[in-house]
Amino acid sequence: MKTKTLKSNNINIVTLGCSKNVVDSEVLLSQLKANDIYAVHESSKNNHKIIVVNTCGFIESAKQESIDTILHYSNLKKSGKIEKLYVTGCLSQRYRDELKSEIPEVDSWFGTFELPALLKKLGADYKHELIGERLISTPSHYAYLKIAEGCNHPCSFCAIPLMRGKFKSKPVELIIEEAKNLAKNGVKELILIAQDTTYYGMDISGKKQISELLQKLAEIEQIEWIRLHYSYPSHFPLDVLDVMKNNNKICKYLDIPLQHVSDNMLKAMRRGISKRAIIELIDKIKQKVPEISLRTTMLVGHPGETEQDIEELKEFVERIKFSRLGVFTYSHEENTHAYSLVDDILQEEKDKRAEYLMNVQQNISYEENQKKIGKTLKVLFDKSDREFFIGRTEADSPDVDNEVLVPIKDNYLRIGDFSNVKITKADFFDLYGKIVK
C-alpha cells in the first residue's frame, strides 16, 4: 500500500513567541508523525521543501519578528529554494486578511484553532486518538504542559483574547493522560502554562481547581518537579501555597506577572487589583512559603504613566526583591481597550524606563546570588557547551531565569540528570559551582 511518507527533513516547523506556541508546534509534529510524514522543528538546514511558520502576534516587536521570518521564507520560495510556505498561529489569526494581500508567496494561512485544516493541507489526517500525545522539542527531560486556552481577563493592553478567545480549561483527565505520556518518555519536569494557570477550572466547575490538578500531577511517579507559570494576581487561590509547601514535587517557584504597582496604572491597565492588595498577597505568599522564588514581569510606558508611577514601581521592586524580574514596553495594539487612549510616551522613553528598572533588578539579582555562595543546591542539567555543563535550580525556569554552570573539566554529568552542586562563584544572573558527591 502506498504511504504518505515524505522525504526526510521535508517539513520544517519554525516556532515564534511563547511556550504555548511551542506546545502547539509539538502537537503538529506528533500528528504528522502519526501520518507517516517526517517533520523537524527549527532545523538550521536549508533542505526543506515545506516550511510552516507558527507566529506570535502579542506585541509590536513579536509581530515584526513574525513578519520578518515570513518574508525570509517567502524570498526563499521566490528563489525556488522551498516549494510551499504555510503560516499559522496568533499573527495569522489576527491579521490573516491583511497579510494575504501583502505576502502572496504564502500558500495558506491558518488561525490558532485550525490544526485539522493545516494537517489536511500537508496531506495528513487529524487523528483524534492522539489527543494527549506530542513530540516535545525541548530537551527530553522537561516539557511545557498547556492546561488551558484563551483568557477572560480584560487587561487594557492585551490582545490575547482576540487571538485565543475566552478561557477554556482542558479536562483534567486529558491533562493527566498527557502528563503520564510525557513521563513515560523521560520527562522529569512539567512546566504548567496557560494565560492564567490559577484560573484553571473556573469555566468547568465555577471554582479554581489548580490545587487539585497539581496534587494529581504530583502522583505521577516519574515526575520530580512541577513548575507553575503565568499566575494572575487578582483573586489568587491561596490554597496553591499549601500544596506548594507540603509537596516536594511542586517547585517553590511562582511566576506571577504583576505588570505594575501604582494604583494609577493598575486602574488604567484594568488589572482588577490594587497596590495594597498586591503587597498583602506577596506578604501572604512569603509567609506561607518562605523559601519561594518569585518571578514577575512589569509593563512600562502604558498611556498615562508618569515618572512618579515609575518611581513608585522602582521602590516596590527594591522592597520586594523579586528573585526574577522581566520588563517589557507598552505596545499600542489595535482593538485593545488601551488603543482608544493616546500612545503619548515615545519609544525612546519607554526603553529608558525599562532599562532603569532592569538596572535596579540587576543589582538585586547580584546581591541575592552572592548569598548562595557556599550553599549546595539541587540542579537539573539541561545542556552543555565547550566549557560548561549548564543547569537550573528549583528557583529557575528554562530560557528566562538564572543558570548554574559547572566546568566540564574534571566533572562528568549526564544531561537530564539531577546533581548536587556547591556554589563557588556568582555574578548578576548566573551561578558557578562544582559537583558534590
Image (spheres, rainbow, N blue to C red):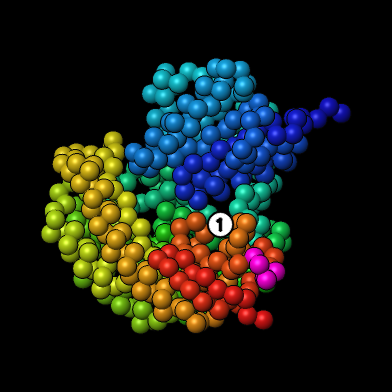
- Residue 421, compared with residue 358, is above or below; it is below
The residue at the point 55 percent across, 66 percent down is: 405
- Residue 102, compared with residue 180, is above or below; it is above
Name the residue nearer the viewer: 224 or 367.
367
Q: Mark 1 points at which residue?
A: 145
Q: Which amino acid does label 1 sit on?
A: Leu
Q: Position of residue 252 (x, y in %)?
A: 47, 74
Type of secondary structure dominating the magenta stretch: loop
User: Crowding at label 1, few (<14), some or many (≥20) Cα neighbours within 10 Å?
Assistant: many
268 left or right, relative to 117:
left
Question: Which quadrant of the rendered structure holds the N terminus?
Answer: top right
Q: Residue 37: which quarter of the image?
A: top right
Name the residue nearer the viewer: 204 or 196.
196
Q: Residue 262: which quarter of the image?
A: bottom left
Q: Where is residue 202 in the image (x, y as percent from the top left)?
A: 42, 60
Name the residue nearer the viewer: 104 or 121.
104
The residue at the point 14 percent across, 56 percent down is: 307
Name the residue nearer the viewer: 82 or 404.
404
What segment is highlighted magenta in the picture? 408-412
